[in-house]
Image (cartoon, rainbow, N blue to C red):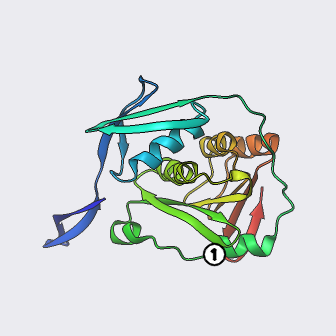
C-alpha cells in the first residue's frame, strides 16, 4: 500500500511514505471491462466484487480468480426491482456516524488516500483505503457482498464530495444512505431524489440532507 522514497524537503534529504499504485485488468465473465486500472494493490477480491455489482454488470458473484495482473470475476445478472429506503432518518445517529474518527492510517502517513466505510447502525462493518475514492467505495461494497450482508439497512460513509458516479454505485448495490464531509453535485442530487437515496454532508456538527 505504501513505500518509502527519498526526497528533498527545503533542500534537506529525508525519507517519506508515498502510495503504491498498481495496474490491473478486470474481466467479467471473460470479457475485458477495465484495462490497466489504477488501484492500491490490496483487497482485490473485494474491489472486483464491488465494482461488478456497483457498475451494474452482475447481481450475483460466483467466483473470483486473480492471476498476476489479471482479475477474473464470474457471476450472473438478474434484473431486480430496487428497494427504496425508509428515509425517516435518525439525525443524531447520522451526526454520530459522520463525526466518528476512523483509522485513516495510510492517509495520515501520505495524505494520498481516500477511504470508505460501511455502517450498520452505530456498528462499523468495514473500512478501506485506496488511492481512488471510487475504488475504496467498491472495496467496501464488495466486502459486504462477499460476506452476505443485507444492504437495506447499511450506510455508506466515505471521503470526498458526492458525485453522480458514487450515487449510481449506491443505486446498483441498493444502498440508501450516503454520508460524507463534502457536498453533493447537482446530478448526484437529481439521481438520489429519483431513487430515494439520502445524501448527507456531516461537517462541523451539522447534518445537511440533500
Give the farthest residue toward the top. Answer: 31
Residue at image x 53%, y 31%? 75
Location of residue 160 (image quadrant): bottom right
Residue bearing the label numbered 1: 99
Q: Relative to residue 72, is residue 97 drawn left or right? A: right
Residue 164 lies, in percent from the top left, at: 64, 42
Q: Relative to residue 63, is residue 109 drawn left or right? A: left
Residue 108 lies, in percent from the top left, at: 39, 72
Residue 185 lies, in percent from the top left, at: 67, 47
Work out whether 173 lies above or below 200. above
Residue at image x 68%, y 60%? 155
- Which one is nearer the viewer's eye here, 19 or 126? 126
Q: Relative to residue 41, is residue 156 drawn left or right? A: right
Work out whether 96 lies above or below 126. below
- Which one is nearer the viewer's eye here, 81 or 176? 81
Work out whether 145 lies above or below 100. above
Residue 192 lies, in percent from the top left, at: 75, 45
Residue at image x 62%, y 42%? 169
- Which one is nearer the viewer's eye here, 148 or 6? 148
Residue at image x 59%, y 40%? 54
Amino acid at each position: 500500500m505504501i513505500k518509502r522514497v527519498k526526497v528533498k524537503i527545503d533542500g534537506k534529504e529525508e525519507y517519506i511514505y508515498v502510495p503504491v499504485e498498481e495496474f490491473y485488468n478486470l474481466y467479467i465473465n471473460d470479457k475485458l471491462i477495465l484495462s490497466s486500472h489504477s488501484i492500491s494493490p490490496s483487497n482485490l477480491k473485494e474491489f472486483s466484487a464491488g465494482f461488478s455489482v456497483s457498475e451494474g454488470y452482475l447481481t450475483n458473484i460466483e467466483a473470483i480468480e486473480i492471476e498476476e495482473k489479471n482479475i477474473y470475476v464470474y457471476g450472473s445478472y438478474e434484473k431486480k426491482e430496487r428497494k427504496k429506503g425508509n428515509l425517516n432518518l435518525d439525525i443524531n445517529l447520522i451526526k454520530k456516524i459522520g463525526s466518528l474518527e476512523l483509522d485513516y492510517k495510510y492517509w495520515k502517513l501520505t495524505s494520498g488516500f481516500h477511504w470508505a466505510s460501511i455502517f450498520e447502525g452505530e456498528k462499523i462493518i468495514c473500512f478501506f483505503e485506496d488511492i481512488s475514492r471510487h475504488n475504496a467505495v467498491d472495496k467496501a461494497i464488495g466486502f459486504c457482498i462477499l460476506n452476505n450482508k443485507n444492504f437495506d439497512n447499511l450506510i455508506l460513509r466515505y471521503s470526498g464530495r458526492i458525485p453522480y458516479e458514487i450515487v449510481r454505485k449506491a443505486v446498483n448495490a441498493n444502498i440508501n444512505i450516503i454520508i460524507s464531509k463534502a457536498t453533493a453535485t447537482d446530478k448526484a442530487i437529481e439521481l438520489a431524489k429519483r431513487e430515494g437515496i439520502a445524501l448527507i454532508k456531516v461537517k462541523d456538527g451539522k447534518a445537511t440532507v440533500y
